[in-house]
């Protein structure tokens, strides 16, 4: 018996259909995973709405999960039957059981639960490459994080803090401001504030070397206005829609840099994936970064989870339980 959430046509949360599907058999290079937890991410919304195009319809959305290997295809040596594994970046996660490329799977160390692993692979490895690779956050620096109470945001705040940075977080409500302060943010700004003015005040006019922005269109100019000359704008999401600004503005605002990184690029090689995941596992096991699974939904209720995510009703990470 196997069930999955499938999208037959793009659109709203009501397009997420809970259906019985055949149990897949692993092809060469694949492993069959009986899933224990599935991560919820904004990229799932992008695939559901059609902002990101699925290879074909119907499609099972979801990029991240954790479970136990039940079978392996020919040529698989990186994992074995019975291994506890997690993954990110393999479309098809909203299912009770699924096949995935074995080279995308990493073994979950003792002391980390399936729920934690499913909640942190995509968001946690994203946070890892953002603060350790895209821009190497250093002690004594001040950085700005938009949507700081979200899944990636809360991890970013904690990780940057553990590296010795001063962290300014931007959130939409006073409750979320309190939450990010609890997780180590030095300053909590509201989306209604004059953010560049507040950053100028906090940094005594110096502004910040890097801004992490997953919001997109609505915050792009604000983010640029918080950067010091030759600062780096890291645009890693489109929660409010895609950015379409003329690049000439980068010159006008101080020869700024912009990058649009993705986890897939940073973990395309097996060695890079394992190193990124192990860095994440280490920082979580050390206690420096706590993975907050603040919401759980049954997998069959994925539509309710999407509604909560899109209405900004969630904080931290959300997992779906098959």
Image (tube, grey):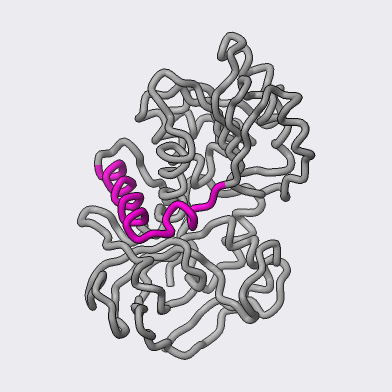
> Which quadrant would the N terminus be assigned to in this image?
bottom left
Prevalent SS, magenta region? helix
User: For the point 40% across and 52% down, which residue is it?
Assistant: 120
Q: Position of residue 112 (x, y in %)?
A: 27, 54
Q: Residue at x 79, y 39 (%)?
A: 246
Image location (x, y in percent) of residue 193: 69, 24
State whether residue 101 is above or below residue 247: below
**Residue 286 visible, this orientation:** yes
Which image quarter: residue 15?
Answer: bottom right
Q: Give the camera-side residue of 90 and 170.
A: 90
Q: Quadrant of residue 131?
A: top left
The residue closer to the viewer here, 8 or 135, is: 135
Residue displayed at 77% across by 33% down = 248
- Residue 65: give x, y in percent of width and height: 41, 65
- Can residue 175 be seen here? The reply is no
Query: Toward which corner of the image does residue 121 lie, by quadrant?
Result: bottom left
In the depicted structure, whether residue 118 falls above or below residue 199: below
Task: Pinpoint residue 57: horizontal percent, then vertical percent.
Answer: 65, 80
Say above or below: 15 vs 19. above
- Decide if residue 33 is on the left or right side of residue 315: left
Q: Work out which residue is located at the far top of the displayed protein and give it.
A: 204
Per the image, is 279 magenta? Answer: yes
Name the residue: 73% across, 32% down.
221
**Which stretch did the figure color magenta?**
261-285
Query: Could you tell me which quadrant the C terminus lies in?
Result: bottom left
Left or right: 196 as drawn, with respect to 87: right
């Amino acid at each position: 018996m196997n069930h999955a959430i499938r999208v037959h046509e793009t659109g709203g949360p009501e397009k997420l259909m809970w259906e019985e599907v055949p149990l897949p058999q692993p092809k060469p290079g694949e492993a069959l995973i009986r899933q224990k937890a599935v991560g919820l991410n904004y990229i799932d919304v992008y695939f559901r709405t059609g902002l990101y195009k699925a290879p074909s319809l119907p499609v099972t959305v979801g990029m991240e999960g954790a479970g136990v290997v039940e079978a392996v295809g020919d040529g698989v040596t990186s994992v074995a039957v019975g291994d506890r594994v997690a993954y990110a970046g393999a479309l098809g996660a909203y299912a009770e059981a699924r096949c995935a490329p074995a080279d995308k799977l990493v073994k979950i160390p003792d002391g980390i639960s399936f729920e934690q692993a499913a909640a942190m692979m995509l968001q946690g490895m994203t946070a890892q490459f953002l603060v350790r690779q895209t821009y190497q956050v250093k002690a004594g620096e001040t950085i700005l994080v938009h949507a700081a109470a979200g899944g990636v945001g809360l991890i970013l705040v904690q990780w940057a803090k553990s590296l010795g940075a001063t962290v300014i977080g931007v959130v939409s409500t006073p409750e979320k401001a309190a939450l990010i302060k609890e997780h180590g943010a030095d300053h909590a700004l509201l989306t209604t504030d004059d953010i560049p003015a507040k950053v100028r005040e906090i940094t005594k006019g110096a502004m910040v070397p890097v801004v992490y922005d997953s919001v997109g269109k609505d915050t792009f100019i604000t983010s640029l206005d918080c950067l010091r000359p030759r600062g780096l704008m890291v645009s890693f999401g489109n929660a409010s829609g895609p950015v379409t600004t003329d690049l000439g503005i980068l010159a006008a605002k101080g020869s700024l840099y912009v990058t649009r990184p993705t986890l897939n690029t940073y973990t395309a090689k097996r060695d890079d994936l394992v190193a990124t995941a192990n860095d994440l596992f280490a920082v979580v096991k050390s206690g420096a970064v706590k993975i907050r699974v603040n919401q759980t939904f049954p997998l069959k209720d994925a539509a309710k989870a999407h509604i909560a995510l899109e209405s900004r009703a969630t904080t931290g990470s959300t997992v779906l339980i098959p």
